[in-house]
Amino acid sequence: MIKILDNVLKTKRKRLLFIGIIMIICILAIGIYRLVYQKGVVSDKKLVTAIHAIDVKKEDIVKNISLVGQTIPKEQVDVAAKYAGRIDSVDAELGQKVTAGQVLIREDSNDAALSVDVNRHAYNQAAADEQTAQAQLDANYNKAKADYDKALATYQRNSQVYAVGGISADDMDAARQQMQDAEAALSAIENQMNAGTASSVLSAQENMAKARSSLTAAQRQENDMTLISSIDGTVGYRQVEAGDMVTVGQKLMSIYDNSSIYVDYQVSEEDLPAFSVGMSLPVNIESLHDTFNGSVIYISPTIDATSMTYILRVSLDNANEALKGGMFARAALKSVLRSDVLAVPKAAVLAKNGKNYVFVIKADNTAERREVTVGTAGDDAVEILGGLSGGENIAVDNLSRLRDGLKVDVLTDGSDAA
């Protein structure tokens, strides 16, 4: 009985071993079939490399430039308190349209008005003092003129009397001295009047000018308590209410003018020649799913040292006021770097050891590796300066498998090259 069981077990092992060998053979056969027949076997059983090829021709070298930025309002004015104090009234609401010169906020100006009144009185007093000093100077001049005229008349009369021996020489000298003293006093006053350097008048004038400046400053402070809009626009920020106490420089309101919208883009040095002031540039606003006509109005004259880019400003037409500040704006430009030049796809050029090569497909479907000189490169194509002629056929894929003299299978059905 035991022998019978041993024979049965041995028979099963042989069967399992046989089945396993058959399965391995089938798997190997399937693999060989896929490797050979599905990877490009020709009728003579010789393995070839499948490629796609194109004819070399002239075309434009094109680069697509993409720009990304955000919209900016034409103007934004922040309204801030110039002086600390209490807010009397707020005369503009959030979202309200305002015009230049319109009152927005009024601060308590009672103290400023008192200061104006005090300084006005001081100015009036200084003006009166200046008039008094001027009148005193005029009076001194008139007195000195009268004294001189009197001394001159006495001197002239004494000269006649002295000539006939009617007075002594001492009396004549005294009359001459009085006349000279009176003339000197008159000349001194006249010189001061002509030069405007009379000390009393000059001091009074300076006091009046100082009082005028103080009055002007007080009036300006009073005016600055009323905050007005300097532009036409819309109230886009308001952080103040009547009765609030504000500090110097505190931002209370912002006015935005969206009548024109700008977008500032950063452009690299190599892309800058594609743009010029005045050129049209459509701008897509993603949030609005719409494209707006734009015009380049400014290109920065020098590069930004931090970003190493140039600023390009584009003005957008916003007649319907659909555009707002801060919207994501994308622009694209198709730039022709070189026109009508011999060019090949970038994928057709193989760079190796600092040199560039292409594989030319000859009439007998064999590959020839040829060194070429490349020029300007675009997004998809590169200019060929030397090494190729128009009309030659070159491989555009599977370059890593190609070598000189290798037979290739040129695919024409659009299938993938293996």
Image (cartoon, rainbow, N blue to C red):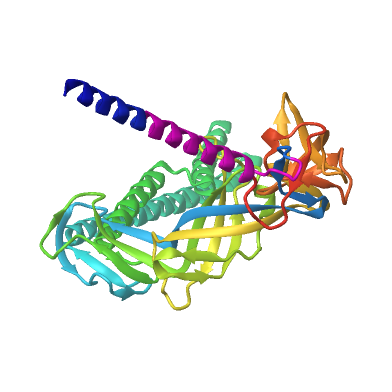
Magenta span: helix, strand or loop, mainly? helix
* Residue occupying the far bottom of the picture: 320
Nearer the observer, 15 or 85: 15
From the viewer's perspective, tell me whether residue 56 is left or right of residue 100: right
Nearer the observer, 205 or 47: 47
From the viewer's perspective, tell me whether residue 177 is left or right of residue 219: right
Query: Which residue is depicted at the point 60% across and 52% down?
Result: 65
Nearer the observer, 131 or 404: 404
From the top left corner, tell me how far across and down residue 197 is, in percent.
Answer: 47, 43
Query: Which residue is depicted at the point 53% across and 64% down?
Result: 283
Q: Quadrant of the N terminus?
A: top left
Where 268 falls versus 20 (above or below)? below
From the viewer's perspective, tell me whether residue 85 is left or right of residue 141: left
From the top left corner, tell me how far across and down residue 21 is, in percent.
Answer: 43, 31
Q: Which residues are magenta?
A: 17-44
Q: Quadrant of the C terminus?
A: top right
Query: Which residue is depicted at the point 38% across and 46% down?
Result: 206
Q: Does the rendering let one see residue 382? A: no
Nearer the observer, 126 or 276: 276
Verify whether residue 219 appears in magenta. Answer: no
From the top left corner, tell me how far across and down residue 381 is, in percent.
Answer: 71, 48
* Residue occupying the far left of the picture: 243
From the top left corner, tell me how far across and down residue 397 is, in percent.
Answer: 68, 43
